[in-house]
Image: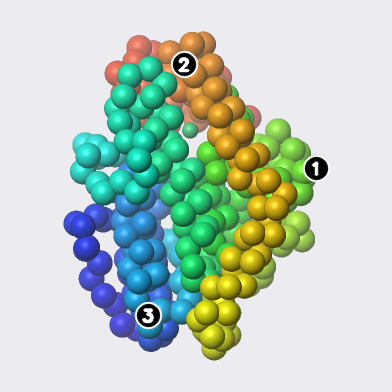
Amino acid sequence: MQSTPFDPHAYGGVRYEHLAPDIVNIAMSRPAVRNAQDMEMTYALNAAFDRAAQDDAVKVIILSGDGDHFSAGHDMGGDRSRTWRDFRTVGTWAAFDGPGVEGLYGREKEIYLEMCERWRNLSKPTIAAVQGSCVAGGLMLAWCCDMIVAADNARFRDPTLEFGVAGVEFFMHPWELGTRKAKEWLMTADWLAAEEARQCGMVNQVVPVADLMASALALAKKIADKGSFVLKAVKESVNHAQDVGARRNAMMHAFGLHQLSHHHNKQQWGMLVDPNGIHPALREKIRVRFNLPALPGREPATTA
Ligand code: ZN
């Protein structure tokens, strides 16, 4: 396995390695925090995707997570003193620290919604290799890939409704699961097991956890065998077929309601999420981060 140090912009949290001359693995490498995605990891992922897109030798891209879990979602512990001005933004809204709703809207639009849309539309085929827990923002990372290979221990969950937020920012639930299952899954905030996710069409393959990377690589090799232009063309064709159903417009509407739910919580609780639904340990982390007084909260029905 040829491993290349990845540091194009001094961003961290991601490893970039060739599994074959034409296949790259972009690995989230913060296993100690279950690959929680902070701003630095977001821009590192974006730089890695760009690098793979711009390398003519690369045909297929795998996105994986080091350790026992693919992703715990967005890092609620903060951005380790980094601000948006430390990174090369890809959109034009900027002003993540703007007043009123301007800051949060601009930040979440850039680093969650539009970044995932950008990766979804990346020209080359992408495969997510998912093991363990894939939660909230982690779903967005798996969903923006063209295919998902899941380990038999993989499980998926969007817990946002428990803390007063109307689903994750990249609102693909209805397209991934169908409308009825999406409603049940969101409203119960239950786990979705790998095999059930496969039956719903969200996951392509379920494989033994020990075989996860080998299975993703075997799929990538089969695809890499095809011509690079027809791969790009067929990917764009399928993406456009999905968009004929107004996916993008529906998603922008959902994003507006997501922002509204954040600000509803802000009015209700003085913070962007409802602290009642947050695990006590995480609640304390958020309280410290935002310098808030003691927060109300009950024991959550489920834990993330
Ligand atoms: Zn949000």
Which SS class for mark 3?
loop
Name which of mark 2 and mark 3 comes first in the sequence. Answer: 3
**Depth check: 111 or 177 in front?**
111
Question: Dot 2 surroundings within 10 Å: few (below 14), some, or many (20 or more)?
Answer: some
Amino acid type at mark 1: Arg
Element type at mark 2? helix
How far apart marks 2 and 3 lie (CA) works out to 47 Å
**Residue sitting at x 27%, y 39%:** 84
Image coordinates for residue 77, horizontal then vertical, percent: 34, 36
In percent of width and height, residue 107 lies at: 38, 35
Residue at 42% across / 83% down in the picture?
A: 22
Label 1 sits on a secondary structure element that is helix
Q: Residue furthest bottom?
A: 225
119 or 30, which is in the foreground?
Answer: 119
- Residue under label 2, please give it: 266
Q: Going from the N terminus, do you reach mark 2 or mark 1 first?
A: 1
In this rendering, the answer to whether 183 lies above or below 192 is: above
Disc number placed over residue 180 in the picture, else none: 1
Q: Position of residue 234 (x, y in %)?
A: 62, 72
